Amino acid sequence: MKRRKIGKLFVMGLLIGCLGVPTQASTLSDAKNSKKELEDNKSKAESQVSKLQQKQKKLEASIKKLDKKMSVLDTRLNKLTNQLEDKRTALANTKEELVQAKEDEKNQYTAMKKRLKYMYESGDTNYLDILFQAKSIGDLLNRTEYVAEIAEYDNTMLDRLETARKKIATTEKRQEQEVKEVKELKSEVQQQRKEVKALVADKKSQIKEYEASIKKKKSLISAYEKQIDQQEKKIIQLEEEARKKAEEEAKAKQESNTASSSDTSTSSSSSSSNSSGSGFTWPAPSSHTITSPYGYRTHPILGTKKFHSGIDIGASYGSSIVAADSGTVIAASYNSSMGNYVMIDHGGGITTVYMHASSLLVSSGQKVSKGQQIARVGSTGRSTGPHLHFSVMKNGSYVSPWGYL
């Protein structure tokens, strides 16, 4: 019953795990969600493997204890087997002694009966003849004593033989009882050994089921890892496509702005430090120095090629960070990578992110207006120096900020 239950639980877990494997994602947001779901499923499977391994170790420890108990029972069983053999041998010898004692008693009794019969049939004349044939008083006394000794000898021998027979018979009964008790005790130990052996077999069977379950779970984990790797590649591909698209849009927009009238261009140029055609205000009024662009780059700390989700604006420590547009603060917190950061929802699926601040001047849920100071430049989190990391997200995916600045 227990084995069936384990099997059903495993099949159910496997089916649930398979149902939890996401299909191929078509958008960046879907790809990230799929990867997260796969990682969660992998983590659950790893947790299940850990629990199964713990149960397996407990079973193995239990089997060791049962093996020790089995060894004790085997020792006791061998001792009882030898003891039973000795008891049976002693009983067999006693039975032989009893047979001989009965035979001796029977022979003595037969001899005595013959003598009594002879004396009865001959009458007292024989005794009188024996006595009258005496040649002297001394001889008479000797003959009288001889006749008495014969009778006494018969009675004494018969009594001794009867006593010996009874004693041997008593010994036989006692030994038969001892043999019976040892046999019962041996039977009890054999039954205990049988039960322990059955327990060991059952636990070993459970261990095999756990091993099979662990093997299948590990296979499932391996499948999750492969799918996670596929999703990571998909995410990189989609981010690259988004980056290229954003750059193309920014380039097209820049060409469109360049084609406008020189007066309008001059006016736009003079106010570019404060606003853009999209309506966004430059988030770091004190500096326009770009220290790291949007897109793939070699990470300054990790030293690996990674996608940079925004632009880094080099600025002095403590200088002002302002909201690029009006909106609602949806996060104002700290992250080990982002440091002190602010996220603002501007509506229409557009969100801006401001990272590595030295201090935050707004809180989550607060309404802010375009150009309002929300933080101060710093170097918190994963940073090499004072700067503002500014990102733009559209419908949950990072896009090039140049399309909005």
Image: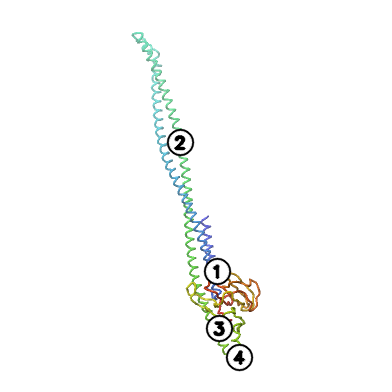
55 and 280: which is toward the camera: 280
Q: CA distance from mark 1 to mark 4?
A: 47 Å
Give above or below for 263 relative to 240: below
Identify the residue under disc 2. 178
Looking at the rendering, which quadrant does residue 20 occupy?
Answer: bottom right
Residue sitting farthest toward the top: 136
Which of labels 3 and 2 is toward the front?
3
Q: Which mark is residue 250?
A: 3
Q: Is label 4 in a helix, a strand or a loop? A: helix
Q: CA distance from mark 1 to mark 2?
A: 81 Å
| Disc on the earlier residue, 3 or 2 | 2
Identify the residue under disc 4. 263
In contact (CB < 8 Å): disc 1 and disc 2: no
Residue at the (60%, 70%) spot, across then down: 333
Type of residue at label 4?
Asp
Type of residue at label 1?
Ser
Type of residue at label 2?
Glu
Number of residues whose C-alpha sits closer than 10 Å to that of mark 1, classed few (under 14), some (14–19) or many (20 or more) = few
- Residue 388, percent across and down? 56, 76
Q: Is label 2 in a helix, a strand or a loop? A: helix
Identify the residue under disc 1. 336
Q: Is label 3 in a helix, a strand or a loop? A: helix
Of the 4 image quadrants, the one containing the C terminus is bottom right
